[in-house]
Image (tube, helix red, strand yellow):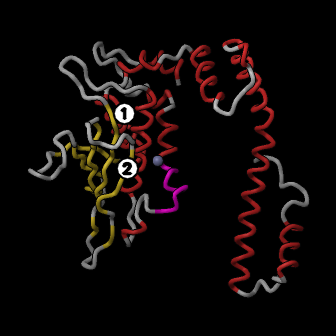
């Protein structure tokens, strides 16, 4: 974004559209709003065009590398197909960085990952997560854990039900959903949000805790980003609270959490071998 706007891109187009539609009376509120909207659209288009200009060279290079790998592994059929890039970039990444997800699982026990989230939320937001015993009949499966989300000065912010483990009739999809949105009640009290985080993690066994692959850990962080969004919203009405916002924006906190999940400075704080307690430092420096 360091270069200036492209010459002639914004204004003439805007004027042209204005002329065609005969909308030069910008003092009219609706027309002014339309013009503002158009300006926003143009800014977005300018940004996307600039991004695509800057990325095209790197993308071509990446495609060359991917094509080379396909040529090596599949010389009879080496043309690149639309479904090839995800597979071959995985192969290249594994070869270059020696990544084998199962090697890292022992460092990401569910307990260690939850501790990681606790550390992160504590530092970023002054928030701590506390396990609470659900009342009889409160949860739909005995695997479900209840977390109270407590802010250092605001107190209790809401509850997260963690439905983390696989079971036969459960949809195979990681997601976050709202049971009760936050809202300001008529008496001035705040109705606390209650949400569910649903994952499909393997159960622990007698000698093995639940171990997450780096991808599962990233998903956990992603979904927890949604949960925190819901916890932190203090809207007056519940239909616009937390993740009940434009879909693109709803993903922002979660994408941010993915960055944390992929930053070795964060991961180093909690990745521990479940048997030896060894810190995952070296590993994380290579993987992440
Ligand atoms: Zn999401």
Q: Ligand 1: does it lie within 8 Å of the C-beta at label 2? A: yes
Q: Residue at x 70, y 12 (%)?
A: 72
Question: Is 248 a magenta residue?
Answer: yes
Q: Residue furthest front?
A: 76
Task: Classify residue 165 by image quadrant.
Answer: top left
Neighbour tally class for label 2: few under 14, some 14-19, many 20 plus, Cα within 10 Å: many
Label 1 sits on residue:
116
Label 1 Cα neighbours within 10 Å, binned few <14 / some 14-19 / many ≥20: many
Relative side of 254 to 185, left or right: right
* Residue 203, magenta (yes or no): no
Give the magenta part as a residue range: 245-253
Vertical placement of residue 48 versus 106, above or below: below
Pinpoint residue 104: horizontal percent, then vertical percent: 42, 19
User: Residue 69's quadrant in the figure?
Assistant: top right
Residue in the image at 49% along x and 27% along y: 264
**Residue where numbered disc 2 is placed:** 176
What residue is at 73 percent from the left and 19 percent from the top?
78
The x and y percentages for residue 257 are: 47, 41
């Amino acid at each position: 974004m360091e270069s200036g706007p492209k010459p002639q891109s914004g204004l003439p187009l805007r004027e042209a559209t204005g002329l065609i539609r005969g909308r030069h009376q910008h003092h009219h509120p609706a027309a002014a709003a339309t013009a503002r909207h158009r300006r926003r659209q143009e800014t977005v288009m300018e940004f996307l065009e600039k991004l695509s200009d800057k990325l095209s060279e790197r993308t071509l290079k990446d495609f060359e590398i991917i094509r080379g790998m396909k040529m090596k592994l599949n010389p009879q059929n080496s043309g690149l197909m639309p479904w090839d890039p995800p597979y071959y970039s995985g192969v290249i990444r594994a070869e270059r960085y020696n990544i084998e997800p199962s090697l890292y699982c022992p460092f990401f026990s569910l307990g260690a990952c939850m501790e990681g989230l606790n550390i992160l939320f504590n530092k970023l937001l002054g928030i701590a997560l506390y396990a609470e015993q659900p009342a009889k009949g409160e949860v739909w499966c005995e695997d479900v854990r209840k977390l109270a989300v407590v802010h250092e000065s605001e107190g209790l912010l809401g509850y997260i039900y963690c439905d983390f483990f696989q079971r036969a009739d459960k949809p195979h999809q990681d997601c976050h959903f709202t049971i009760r949105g936050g809202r300001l009640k008529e008496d001035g009290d705040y109705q606390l949000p209650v949400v569910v985080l649903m994952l499909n993690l393997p159960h622990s066994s007698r000698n093995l805790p639940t171990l997450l692959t780096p991808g599962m850990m990233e998903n956990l962080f992603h979904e927890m980003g949604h949960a925190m969004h819901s916890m932190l919203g203090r809207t007056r009405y519940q239909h616009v609270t937390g993740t009940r916002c434009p879909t693109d924006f709803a993903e922002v906190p979660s994408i941010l959490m993915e960055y944390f999940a992929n930053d070795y400075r964060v991961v180093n704080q909690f990745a521990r071998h479940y048997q030896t307690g060894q810190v995952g430092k070296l590993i994380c420096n290579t993987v992440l």
